[in-house]
Image: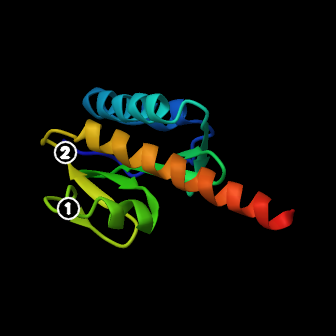
Amino acid sequence: MEIKQQTIIPKSIDEYILQYPQEIQETLNTIRKVIKESAPNAQEKISYGMPTFVSNGNLVHFAAFKNHIGFYPTPSGINTFKQELSGYKTSKGAVQFPLGKPIPYELISKIVKFRVDENKNKADEKIKRKK
């Protein structure tokens, strides 16, 4: 299955997801749903041309590629869940979930909740320092 590389930067996550084949759309929509449930107060936007969730700063990004779904929970999200992510290709701030294999939605949820808490704690610290 060939996934075309996007040429037009989408204005919304809906627009982003609609440019992919049905099978990929279902995966992307499920990831989006898992993130929304794990971070109900987060706002959605497109950043770096990718679906992004924001709450006290960027939480996570995700994107579809030819052979995988990229998930970007920042370096802290990768480091904290290094053990659970050991079966996947990772880099400093990203993990690749291969297409054709089950997506670890529960793990995505845990990472997103961790990022929500991390960003909230950073925001609270900033407020304390200002007092």
Q: Quadrant of the C terminus?
A: bottom right
Viewer can see residue 59? yes
Q: Residue at x 69, y 56 (%)?
A: 123
Residue 98 screen position, x and y as percent: 19, 50
First of labels 2, 1 by sequence position: 1
Q: Residue at x 37, y 73 (%)?
A: 92
View extreme (right): residue: 131
97 vs 13: above or below: below
Q: Are marks 2 and 1 in contact (CB under 8 Å)?
A: no
Is residue 128 rendered to the left or right of residue 120?
right
Element type where label 1 sits in the image: loop
Residue 128 screen position, x and y as percent: 77, 61
Element type where label 2 sits in the image: loop
Q: Which residue is mark 2?
A: 99
Q: Residue at x 53, y 36 (%)?
A: 13
Viewer can see residue 50? no
Q: Quadrant of residue 24?
A: top left
Mark number displayed over residue 127: none
Is residue 121 rendered to the left or right of residue 90?
right
Amino acid residing under circle 2 = Leu
